[in-house]
Image (cartoon, rainbow, N blue to C red):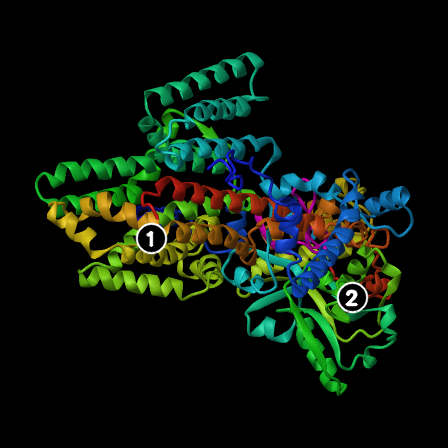
Amino acid sequence: MKKSVFLGTLSAAALLGGIASATTLEDVKARGELLCGSNAGLAGFSAPDANGVYQGFDVAMCRAIAAAVLGDPMKVKVIPLSSETRFTALSAGEVDLLSRTTTWTYSRDTDLKLDFVGTSYYDGQGFMVKKSLGVSSAKELDGATVCIQTGTTTELNLADFFKSNGMTYEPVPLKDNAEAEQQYSAGSCDVYTTDASGLAATRATFADASEHVILPEIISKEPLALTVRHGDNEWADIVKWTFNALLTAEEFGITSANVAEQAAAPGTNPEINRLLGTEGELGAMLGLDKDWAVRAIAAGGNYGEIFEANIGASTPIGLSRGLNALWTQGGLQYAPPFR
Amino acid sequence: MSDASYVREAMLPAQKPPASETGVVHWVRANLLSTWGNIVLTLLAVYVVYLILATIGPWLLRSVWTAGSLQECREIIEATWGEGKRGACFAVIAERWQQIIFGFYPRELYWRPILTLVLMLVALLPILFYETRRFSWWVGVLFAAALFGSVWGHASPVVTVLVGIAAVCLGVWLCVRGPQYLMWFSLIFPAAAFWLLWGGTVWLPVTILLGFVLGYGAYRLVSALNGLAGVIAAVVIPILWWVLLCRAAADVLQGIVPIALVELGSDQFGGFLLSTVIGVSGITFSLPLGILLALGRQSDLLIVKSFCVAFIEGFRGVPLITLLFVASLLLNYFLPPGTTFDVILRVIIMVTIFAAAYLAEVIRGGLAALPRGQYEAADSLGLDYWKAQRLIIMPQALKISIPGIVGTFIGLFKDTTLVSFISLSDPMQIVSSIRANQEWNGIYWELFLFVGLLFFLFCFSMSRYSMYLERKLKTDHR
């Protein structure tokens, strides 16, 4: 056995020799695969299908980035991470980016040395209760037992909300959404609180969905953002601008269906031309080729298409665009100009 | 004298005992209804059993095995059994059982874990049932099944049949010639399993095995000159081989004779495949390490003893989950960036160390139970330390510790589910991600039942085997 332990250590040592490169982009290209930290299972955002291929809104973001960098949206290895392990995994270099419903906060940005590069989904924390409880506002929840996921911002928001309203509660801490759903439906807690998107997804799965109400109060801002390590600005730029490309594509009506056609020849709109590489050298400034944005858009469509396909009104989760509509339609999604 | 008519001359035939003293009636009266207290308890117990059956029975009865989603299941149940009725939706298992068993292993490569499993049984048989020859035929059958199954669908039927026949002949030949040949197979099995499961070039496991051969050769050569130097050479030379030359040699050999399987990453392992890989490797490697640690703890050599005590107390005093976090997260900070030290390998090492620390104490209990006379008898026979351990002490100490050892193994196997905390897809994690799909969100008991049943099968068979072993090794007449 001693030999086996040695063997393990040694094969590690043997593997050390090879790679020790400088930037994330070079690493990704050398590896030929994007390591994308995401959820092991959150309906609509990231979950493996029957063939074991991860699907969802967050995963689609990674696929777009892989398409831009590596030319193939399927060259993504989704690394499922729990709330507790996600930041360590990113810092330790186990993943290239987090696309895992991670809220952009001050302390995470500064203290944890992360860079949040684009808000893929604007969310807010809400409450779900059983109708039979007879509660119509979160202000009436004094003394309630609350199911909550540990290691998340919702845990802190909840404490703040109850404290500022002079109420008490009894937390039931849980590991993940699946466990929380189960405990809530089994009656271990009166209230389930998480991001409103998650509540909608959860409610949709109940056999008696009409017996549960989502209370009107949204008690926090939860900008769920794409996250990279601090200190590699080139890589942060690639992630940021790939996301912006998806937004801009929606703004100008470029879809997965017509992107190839529009990229074939320069059109009349110079910004579309610059985005799709038919004019100027925007790709080279990122360290990519000129078709990078075309591939990113072709992978899963523009932002609106990705939203509709995974979590939009036509899916069982049925989220409306709300804050996540483009700025031109009264939402917050706004991409700086491609110039 | 003949008027002593009260003396019976013939024996009366034996009468049946009264009905109240035999059979079901007696048993019920004696065990269930003997006192008022018992009567009350019996009634209560019957009521509880009825409650459980009345809940689960109809639920199981109304189960659905083919449906595309939980919603569909509910509709089918309501259509068949009436409005508002609930039933089990086993359709999720019908659709996703492969994921629970194999994780994300590519479907067209399922033959590799299956073949590995069957070969593992072949490798285990001569060890588990080392005294009986009954396993002989099983080996032949398993060999045949393994090769037959793995070639099936990958070659023409003629080839499959020929390989199957060859496999039966090989298996039967091995058994007839003696199990010692099979023992050799058991020894190389870990390398074979590694190659089959992870793929890549065949020469890497071969060159790693070669390290052991080199070590043995160095020991034989050098120990002729000096015993201690022999031991040192046996440790140092294989290590040098593994660190410096092993991979290069594998590459060269691969260049000359390319034999390789499709290479798979550890993220594709999941479900019971992952649990079994971690559990079986942990069990295999922790037993010898645990024995060495137990012996080391009893040693008179100060350094050996303190090392073993520190090792055992250190690793036993830390929760397994902490060790797993170290394996998955902290090691990456210590290793140079860009290192890809396989995460499953890291977990296996941690689990092995953890289980070995427990086993060492279990075995120490066995050692402590042996009378002092056994040690002295070994000494008076003139046996040296290792011979005394091998021939007299260990067989008895291990026999005493069997229940404890198997208990540790079962615990270890179940603890493999903890790897979900470091984002490996153990069966429970797979269950969670199945539930994260919109089709199956909200389904719990069916999946938990399936996973629980499989775990029970594994653990129960381990437990039954340990009881068999205890019966077989029972030499006292208590």
Which of the 4 image quadrants contains residue A128? Answer: bottom right
Dot 1 amino acid type: Gly
Q: Is residue B92 left or right of residue A231?
A: right
Q: Is residue A269 left or right of residue A241?
A: right
The residue pinned by badge 1 equals B290
Give the SS element for disc 2: helix
Residues tagged by mark 1 and mark 2 found on one chain of the structure: no
Give the SS element for disc 1: helix
Q: Nearer the viewer, residue B34 or B309?
A: B34
Q: Judge whether residue A38 is colored magenta.
A: yes
Q: Nearer the viewer, residue B179 or B263?
A: B179
User: Is residue A128 something one can see in this rendering?
Assistant: yes
Task: Magenta stretch: give its range.
Answer: A33-59
Q: Is residue A155 left or right of residue B336?
A: right
Q: Residue at x 57, y 21 (%)?
A: B152
The residue pinned by badge 2 equals A196
**Rendering coords of residue B189 (x, y %):** 39, 34
